[in-house]
Amino acid sequence: MTEPDPTHVMIVATFAGLEVVKSRGGYTLVDPGRGTPLARLKPIPQSDRFELLYWSDMRGRWRTFGDFGPLRLTLERAHQIFREETIFHIQPRR
């Protein structure tokens, strides 16, 4: 049996009610009812911080949230932004 991923466990606990899927070095937050990806958390190496991304329909890829490049967010701050910003609640068309 493999050891649980502590980062995955923390994200699941923080973003209760969402499915958290680990893939390609990050964690995608998925609406469990629709299967729609809502946001992505990318761990910043050798820190306890994350980059928060949103899905851009225009570009067809994940984009950094914020106007000034990648933000180094704690998990709690990423959760707060996710709850407050409507861009994370628009259902992507994929």
Image: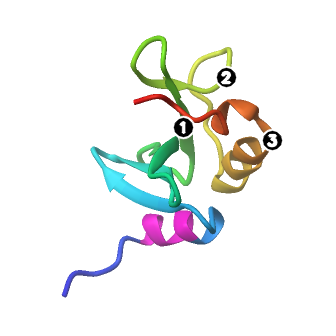
Q: Is 36 on the left or on the right of 90, as rendered?
A: left
Does label 3 or label 2 sit earlier along the sequence?
A: 2
In the depicted view, which residue is nearer to us: 79 or 18? Answer: 18
**Residue type pointed to by label 2:** Gly
Q: Which residue is mark 2?
A: 66
Element type where label 1 sits in the image: strand
State the mark number for residue 79.
Answer: none
Q: Which residue is mark 3?
A: 84
Which residue is at a point 77% across and 49% down the rendered structure image? 80
Is residue 77 covered in magenta? no
State the residue lying farthest toward the left. 1
Name the spot of residue 93 as percent of width and height, x first: 47, 28
Label 2–label 1 contact, CB within 8 A: no
Q: Between marks 2 and 1, how big is the CA–CA gap?
A: 10 Å
Q: The magenta stretch spans which residues?
A: 6-12
Q: Dot 3, how many residues are within 10 Å of its Cα: few (below 14), some (14-19), or many (20+)?
A: few
Does label 2 or label 1 sit earlier along the sequence?
A: 1
Depicted 25 relative to depicted 69: above or below: below
Q: Quarter of the image holding residue 62?
A: top left
State the residue lying farthest toward the right. 84
Element type where label 2 sits in the image: loop
Q: Between marks 1 and 3, how big is the CA–CA gap?
A: 16 Å
State the mark number for residue 51.
Answer: 1
Which residue is at a point 39% across and 30% down the rendered structure image? 94
Q: Main secondary structure of the magenta part?
A: helix
